[in-house]
Amino acid sequence: MLDSADYNVCEGAFGALQKICEDSAEFLEKSADRPLDTLIPKFLQFFKHSSSKIRSHAIACVNQFIISKTQALMANIDAFLQNLFHLAMDDDPDVRKNVCRALVMLLDAHISSLIPHMHNIIEYMMIRTQDPDENVALEACEFWLSLAEHPICKEALKPHLPKLIPILVRGMKYSEIDIILLKGDVEEDESVPDRSEDIKPRFHKSRHTIRHEPMENGGSGGEEFADDESDDGLDDDSSLSDWNLRKCSAAALDVLANVFREDMLPVILPILKETLFHQEWEIRESGILALGAIAEGCMNGMTQHLPELIPYLISCLQDKKALVRSITCWTLSRYCHWAVVLPDHTYLKPLMYELLKCVLDSNKRVQEAACSAFATLEEEACTELVPYLADILKTLVFAFKKYQAKNLLILYDAIGTLADSVGNYLNKEEYIQMLMPPLIEKWNVLKDEDKDLFPLLECLSSVATALQSGFLPYCGPVYQRCVSLVEQTLNQTMAHAQNPGQFEAADKDFMIVSLDLLSGLAEGLNGHVGQLVQQSNIMQLLYQAMQDPMPEVRQSSFALLGDLTKACFQYVAPCISEFMPILGQNLNPELISVCNNATWAIGEISVKLGPEMRVYINLVLNDLIFIINKPNTPKTLLENTAITIGRLGYVCPNEVAPLLQQFIRQWCISLRNIRDNEEKDSAFRGVCNMISVNPGGVVEDFIFFCDAIASWINPKQDLKEMFHKILHCFKEQVGEDNWKRFTEQFPPPLKERLSQHYGV
């Protein structure tokens, strides 16, 4: 039909073929009779068709096969490129858009075919990034994001930077239509209620449930939790389509700043000078956005300009345009680390107070941006904020009265982050009296099935951990409700499994967030949580939750199990024989966070159980040894596994020591970098116990053990004596000469530390 003389038949056939290529690319590629060998050359013939609609269909069809590097396309790659270049200046925006899309995908899938033409392609893409049709410009702008990921980027783009950077900055300016859509002329809207469709669905972010992060001393998430929320300061455009030329241009500037670093400054600084102080607010706003976009990549080169720029930005927080105030909040958050580390709080104080004013702005978009920026400042400043806690809390609590539904969610986050950042400093009667009543009031208003509970539960989890005993007066009803949310979710899951027609599936986020808050209570209240546990059926519920098919539920269950083990083991102990096999089954490094928390919980249980742990060693030890020796295991999981193996050896040295040789080298390497703390202490005692049972197991890797010992800054006296004893025993065994030869291989700092601290 493509060859039909009737235009309508040809176009109709192409429309159908395009949909088939989009939906069934994989089927066409794998089909035994190789239809693509015929189709792709056929499509290429239509690149030069007189109808732009057909030209557009033809490119769109071929584009479906670029990423998978289909053989039939690779065989015709030169013809494809020639035809693409032929259409580069096509009059039809759809054709130009598909040409740009093809070049972006070729960059990722087949860069070698583009390299000979790279100079011309870059020139072309710069023209297209300024295309009068925004869809074409957006497609072209993606090219810079892709190019930045390739090693050739720096060399290929360097000569073009002086032309490209101004194009990207111009692309960041709000268009007139953006401003209309964003209601950019509405300055005060704080009393307009939010429509439910304006509030994006919010997914529970696990804040507390990656257990034991020795490097960072607790925190949010292991290695696989990259924060994937877009951090381009453009979440404020939520009423526009999610991705537009402004966002893409800013993201491109951000990634290029990370590629070129200081080399970008000679180009960007004059542009910033011109835009930041411009009379027209739209241009000034785009300059502030550009300044924020380069923050990460160009930080070193920018520091000398910050003493002048930060006060200017702080003054922009009072700009009469709400859109200028909101983007300024974001840009300041990108540089707040610099303000925080300077002594005397010269910049921190004005920055903090002006941001707090914006938290109470009369414009909802500014409130949102200020609240997010303030949360970033809290993370950077931590306990530096302690002197200002009363003023901070006064502002955040006042915002409860002001905020509509959408911004309340961000406010909870800011309060939770504050609690994480200042910890127990929050446990002061006056602060508790300010903070808890509005939180509990919201807690009482929200129904069990309301998803707005998630951010409130997360926030309370952080607050409970920070307030410790200060949370006691509030813990009863909070604890009860969490247990009942877990129970309701489990019951609904069961009902749905038995009768899917009658009962709908439960939203397990309610259970996950409740388990996390119970963890926060156990961590904060410690022993005081025991009487709550005793009066509830949490142990039965935990037994069910630990077997849930959803990994996130298991991850949070194991975190809670470990926290309850630490806080009130007497109530966990009777269930250990049922819990242990489940923990053993979850030592699967494919699910890093689940595995991590199961490993951590096993370590906590072994410390409490002592020698009685021996009956469970066989359930877990082989898996732990497998994990510690597995290549590319994330650092957090390695450290946790090493600590747990050490703890097992501490309580049951006779059972674990025979396998010492299988893990000692990796064990030493994993733990040499962590700070001195209780977990490291118990793990090293375990290894010393195992070495005294099976000294032969460490002989081949003794240098690694010496290195691990030397990583201690300040071991407790009796642990230091254990180290001393092992080192001297070995020295005696091998004799003075052999010992001397052995220590000759040590790096000088290691040799020096051992002789200084242990006299060997």
Image (cartoon, grey):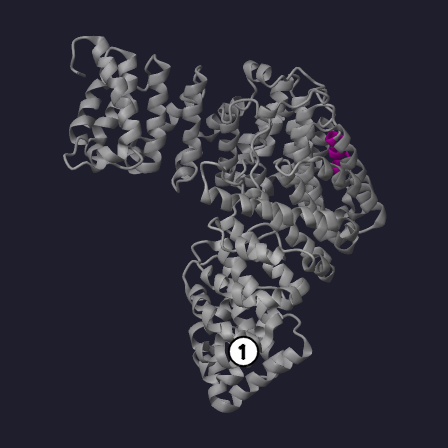
Identify the residue under disc 1: 652
User: Is residue 120 among the parts visible in the rendering?
Assistant: no
Q: Quadrant of the N terminus?
A: top left
Q: Is residue 147 magenta?
A: no
Residue 122, image quadrant: top left
In this rendering, the answer to whether 83 lies above or below 660 is above
The one nearer the camera, 307 or 289, is 289
At which x and y percent is residue 338?
67, 43
What's the residue at 45%, 44% (across, down)? 498
The one nearer the camera, 120 or 638, is 638
User: Is residue 564 among the parts visible in the rendering?
Assistant: yes
Magenta span dominant secondary structure = helix
In this rendering, the answer to whether 62 lies above or below 443 is above
Q: Quadrant of the C terminus?
A: bottom right
Residue 284, image quadrant: top right
Residue 91, image quadrant: top left
| Range of residues picked out in magenta | 351-359
What's the residue at 56%, 76% (across, down)? 612
Q: Is residue 354 magenta?
A: yes
The one nearer the camera, 160 or 69, is 69
Instruction: State the residue lying farthest toward the left.
Output: 33
At which x and y percent is residue 169?
53, 25
